[in-house]
Amino acid sequence: MDKETKKSPLISLEHISKSFAEGNVIYQVLKSVNAEISEGECIALLGRSGSGKSTLLNLISGIDKPDSGRIVIGGVDITALSEHRRTLFRRKNIGFVYQFFNLIPTLTVLENVLLPLELNGKNDRSRALELLDEVSLLDRKGDYPDRLSGGEQQRVAIIRALVHDPIIILADEPTGNIDKETGHNILDIMEKFIRKRGKNLILVTHSKEVAKFADRMLLLEEGVLKKQSREIVW
């Protein structure tokens, strides 16, 4: 019998290091981070403030480049791409959900959701409307973000992250700026729209309760990946 072929990870982080300079002082934020993430896996990235979590998200998205190491996503070494090609890769393959929503205040709800499609040269208005309807915000499509509650804004942000059908969703403290009950509702929506659709999710959080939503947890301490497990004890 032939041996079963091992499936390649969707995301591979290989010896990733990153430093930043402040004046004459250099701070090493990430130190030779290694990790593999399988297709469809939901990862919770935990760590205290300053541990390197947001920096790692920026590297995975291609917003920034590591000082050393490789990041391979779907067989593409994004660290070898030019800035322009990384931007195109990010627009097509990655969606973002932020703690403070990051909706554009001068655009309506529908216009915010349509933005990733337009950046990819598409104008699938029907898909945007369908997704808004699924999160009970179709009747708010013409409103501006300041007319929405925090939970409603985050629902719009999740739909905006998904509308162009990316393979990876990066969520940076998506429940950090809303109350506990609304946070639970947001996790339910992420379960429905991200996990059940087989998308990869990397979720940055300070909350152990939110982290339980994930399949696996990664713990960063002072730029070093300390643990990779299904349960982390602080």
Image (spheres, grey):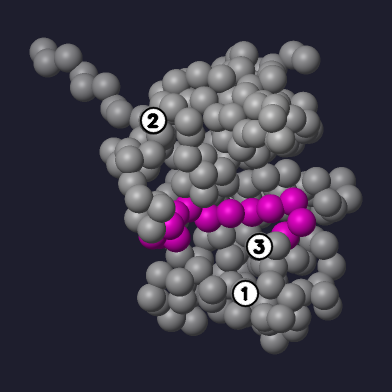
Callout 3 amino acid: Ala
Residue 89 in the magenta stretch? The answer is yes
Whether residue 75 is situated above or below residue 154 in the rendered picture: above
Q: Secondary structure at mark 2?
A: strand
Q: Residue furthest left?
A: 1
Residue 157 in the magenta stretch? The answer is no
Judging by the rendered image, the residue that carries numbered circle 3 is 157
- Left or right: residue 119 versus residue 75 is right
Labels 1 and 2 touching (C-beta < 8 A): no
Callout 1 amino acid: Asn
3 vs 2, front mark:
2
Residue bounds of the magenta highlight: 87-101
Residue 140 location in percent, x, y?
73, 81
Whether residue 44 is situated above or below residue 58 in the rendered picture: above
Q: Secondary structure at mark 1?
A: helix
Residue 218 in view in this figure: no
Judging by the rendered image, the residue that carries numbered circle 2 is 70
The residue sitting at 48% across, 34% down in the picture is 66
Q: Secondary structure at mark 3?
A: helix
Q: Residue furthest front?
A: 24
Residue 88 location in percent, x, y?
38, 59
Callout 2 amino acid: Arg
Judging by the rendered image, the residue that carries numbered circle 1 is 112
Whether residue 182 is situated above or below residue 76 in the rendered picture: below
Badge 1 crowding class, 10 Å Cα cut-off, few under 14, some 14 to 19, many 20 or more, is many
